[in-house]
Amino acid sequence: LVSFILYQSDMADNIRTLIYIFGDMLNSVGAAGKVFEYLDREPQVSTKGTLQPETLTGHVHFNNLSFSYPTRQERKVLQGFSLELRPGQLTALVGPSGGGKSTCVSLLERFYQPQQGEILLDGLPLQSYQHHYLHRKDNIAYGLADCSLERVQEAARRANAHSFISQLEKGYDTDVGERGGQLSGGQKQRIAIARALIREPQVLILDEVTSALDTESEHMVQEALASCPSQTLLVIAHRLKTIERADQIILIDQGTVLEQGTHQELMDRKGSYYKLRERLFTEDDTPH
Ligand code: ATP
């Protein structure tokens, strides 16, 4: 588990956990670290940027984006899309399937280039940053080798993973390759959060697990998320229960921001968020 938290990239089956780490160069465990663990997708954009600032605040601004996928240029997937992610805030993207949530993330990853508008990271266009600085796909082990067990445990504690890890027969020596399939969705998420905490990302993106989490796991994941206050957090939420405490909830439908606000504000408005929630909760209550 220690090495899993530190190095390995293979998060299991049904959990799509995205961890992006922008600018973790100077953290106390050294440089590198796997920044971006998700799909082995190669960007379709030119990567000529050179910026590699030593520090970032993690402020992200999607500024009036319009975007079509290269394979379907006639169809605008995002239109006039604007959104700000602020350091210290948790932003949740919600909305019907196909609305454009994952596309926002792909653009933030710089897998594609929007046809109009731009994404700014700390006020500068994303394309001006060196690609590997944003992604750091390589050098997984380099720089983390001197990370102590105490530090791993500290991260696991903050991520609410320590107690269940301690209860495993081999504790932190557990081979997750073997045990991964036996971890619950909530446990995997908390391990993912522990891994992110070790790397101290400025911008952390979590694609929320779609399978049902029990209430306790949900609570633990929420608390774990709450324990990384200095980061810009973006959660793609499929289940709306977990994001009620988000600083801002962005409802995306047909490539635009339809509604934006806190849970309470959106509930009071009794608009699309309110209806989506009602619909999902009705589905949740039906037996699987
Ligand atoms: P879900 O909640 O189901 O994951 P989403 O809100 O994340 O949906 P996106 O995956 O961003 O939605 O999809 C937005 C639109 O873009 C959809 O119509 C989808 O079919 C289309 N789309 C997504 N990926 C591609 C691609 N690689 N090429 C062409 N079209 C795509």
Image (spheres, rainbow, N blue to C red):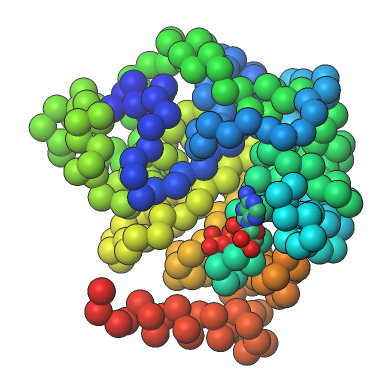
Residue 3: x percent and y percent?
Answer: 34, 21
Residue 92: x percent and y percent?
Answer: 59, 61
For residue 71, side relative to residue 37 (left or right): right
**Residue at x-position 36% and y-position 50%:** 14
For the C terminus, give its image quadrant. Answer: bottom left
- Vertical order, 241 against 231 (above or below): below
Q: Quadrant of residue 217?
A: bottom left
| Closer-to-camera residue (45/56) | 45
For residue 93, side relative to residue 147 (left or right): right
- Vertical order, 226 against 192 (above or below): below
- Vertical order, 170 against 159 (above or below): above
For the N terminus, give its image quadrant. Answer: top left
Look at the image and tell me whether residue 137 can be seen: yes
Kindly give the residue lying farthest to the left in the view shown.
169
Look at the image and tell me whether residue 122 can be seen: no
**Residue at x-position 45% and y-position 67%:** 239
**Residue at x-position 25% and y-position 79%:** 287
Residue 134: x percent and y percent?
Answer: 68, 29
For residue 184, side relative to residue 53 (left or right): left
**Residue at x-position 45% and y-position 78%:** 280
- Vertical order, 207 against 140 (above or below): below
Q: Quadrant of residue 167?
A: top left
Residue 109: x percent and y percent?
Answer: 67, 39
| Closer-to-camera residue (20/286) | 286
